[in-house]
Image (cartoon, grey):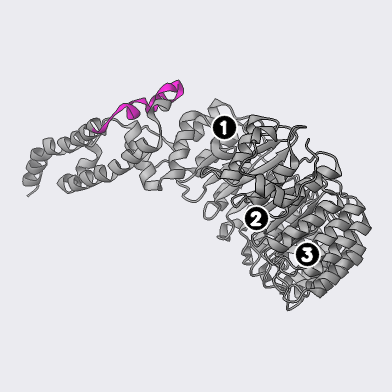
Amino acid sequence: MDTEKRDYEYYKAHAKDVDLEDITSSDHNANLLMMLRDGDPDWNGKFFLLNEEIDGDSDEFIVDDDDCMGWLGFFLGSSEHVVEFGMRFFPEGKDEMEAFMEGFKHNKSLRELYISTDLGSDGYKSLGYMLRHNDNLSSICLHEFVIGLDSARGIASMLGHEQCKTLKHLFFVQNDLSVEGLVDIVTALKKQPQLEELKVCGNNLDSDGCKALKTAFYGWEGASLKYLHLCHNNIDDEGVGYLVSGMARCNYLEALTLCGNPSITTAGFRSLSTFLLSKTCCLERLDLDQTNVDCKGAGALVAGLSSNKSLKCLCLSGNSIDDEGIDVLVSCLPKCSKLEELHLSENGGISALGLKSLSNAFQAGSNLKHLRLRDNSIDDKGLKALVEGMANCRSLTKLDLSRNEAVTATGLQALLRAGRSSLEELELWGIRIGDDGASTIANELVGNNVMERLYFCPSYSNITSKGWSAFSRLLCDYSTVNDTYLSNHIISNIGAYRSGSAPNTSRFHLFLNNNFHSSDAAMLKILMHHHDINMLPFFRWKLMFLPLVVDWFERAKQCWMAIHLMVPGGHILESSDMSALHEFFREGSVEYQSKELSAVYKFVRNAPMLAIGKEQEE
């Protein structure tokens, strides 16, 4: 590497004439520098510094010994088009860092900066220059690398010099910061009241760090903070007390994440409850997953929840909430007028009794839209207890029952019958549904015009071709035109995400449901599976039905044209297990017109008989 010290003006004077191949280790890297220097209309503005290839994308600069870091820093610093820069690797050596930062710190176009390698104290101080002069930089993320005390003080210097008005998002994730280093960084934040999102996760944040946060919040005039993420730290009751005091100054705080702080006890939850009761609280999301909430903790929270008018999402998964805790918790649900999402997964001790309490909350007028109950040892008895109240609950649209392996077809039948008025999404990951369960689900979804997404793990569900056949008939029963019309044209996912697990023909029917209005999807399925439409069943409406036939084909033609533009017919024709669709994708506009004329002709041909029948009736 070229370690000769040069100032910014030197690079600027020689930028147009420098041979890029002389300052890079590969043609690929030379092309990237050319893109930075000369611009490229097809470039997405992203640039990543790595020591080895990850995705093989054109924006990956793989650093080697022959790459000149000074020139790289200059071209990045002078670029007007780079908007996102990620640094996962930087060669060791203070001289290389100084040479790089000499140019890089001048960048004024960068919006997002991701760092996954330590820059050293001086490197962070140089970034402070960028913060003061770049009016576009809105996000900095320091992710998954150790930040020592000297570097932490460099970061504190970077943040504490003066306000960077455009910086809205600041993340520190799994940096193994020392208490002293963390306090230095947090204290410096008092210069950044414009921050809207702060994340300090997996970083040993304890009561001293929380006290420093309180001080920083108190130093903010007109705080803008909306999202505060402090998960997987060492926060205890004392720390929560400091946070609550500081958050009282954050009048726009919408989300607080404290998950993975198991040292918080009932006293801490009582402090949070006080915050929920405060006039300044506008919290919409509170995440207390994995914080050892038990019955007493739930009771401490209820006081604040009962009178809170802003909370929309409450996360209590991975705790120790049993039936008694559920009973205490749900007592406040009818009073939480804004609460739409409740997470109670992995609490283990919830039986039919606790689920009955949830059911009673539905009947009492809860506004819940999303309920997560993963991995709670729920069986059919418990599920039936839960769904008793769902028949009268028209707000619940999403339900997650994943990893409750004791649930069978019997429980699923009761659930789908009770939830057919509102349930749009059902997650059943980690449940062995089997063919009986698949048939039950398919039968219950016939005529269901609400359910849109059904998720389960195909490789774990024990569903064979027999079960998939039931889903196939649900999506398109082509026994008759009427059966096809009455098939399900609403559900857009069955199985894994993006329906990749379903048989090809079923996947195509799901594609139609997802991309077309239900009436248009029905038209296309009829056209695909009924090549010579039998008009006899419609003769009972006599000639008055003829204009409807003509109109139907005119509207269907728009769908026919759209699907031929969206889907390459050759791909369908190459698939042997999609033979039912081959004829449809072989036909052109002439064949379509022929199909339309055939239907009209059947009416014209039978018109004299219809007229004679009418005369005889008279």
Q: Which residue occupies 66% across, 49% down?
A: 12
Q: Is residue 608 left or right of residue 427?
A: left
Disc 2 residue crowd, few under 14, some 14–19, many 20+, Cα 10 Å:
some
Residue 25 at x, y percent in the picture: 70, 31
Q: Position of residue 380 (x, y in %)?
A: 68, 44
In screen coordinates, is 462 left or right of 600? right
For disc 1, the neighbor class at 10 Å (few under 14, some 14 to 19, many from 20) is some
Mark 3 and mark 2 lie on one chain; the one further toward the N terminus is 2
Give the extent of the magenta segment: 573-589
Q: Amino acid at mark 1?
A: Ser
Which sits earlier in the primary sequence, circle 3 or circle 1? Answer: 3
Which quarter of the figure has residue 484?
A: top left
**Mark 3 lies on residue:** 328
Local secondary structure at mark 3? helix
Observer-side mark, 3 or 2, equals 2
In the picture, residue 47 is in which quadrant?
A: top right
- The kind of residue tagged 3 is Val
Q: Which residue is mark 1?
A: 501
Amino acid type of the residue tagged 2 in the rendering? Arg
Give the side of residue 347 with respect to residue 489, left or right: right
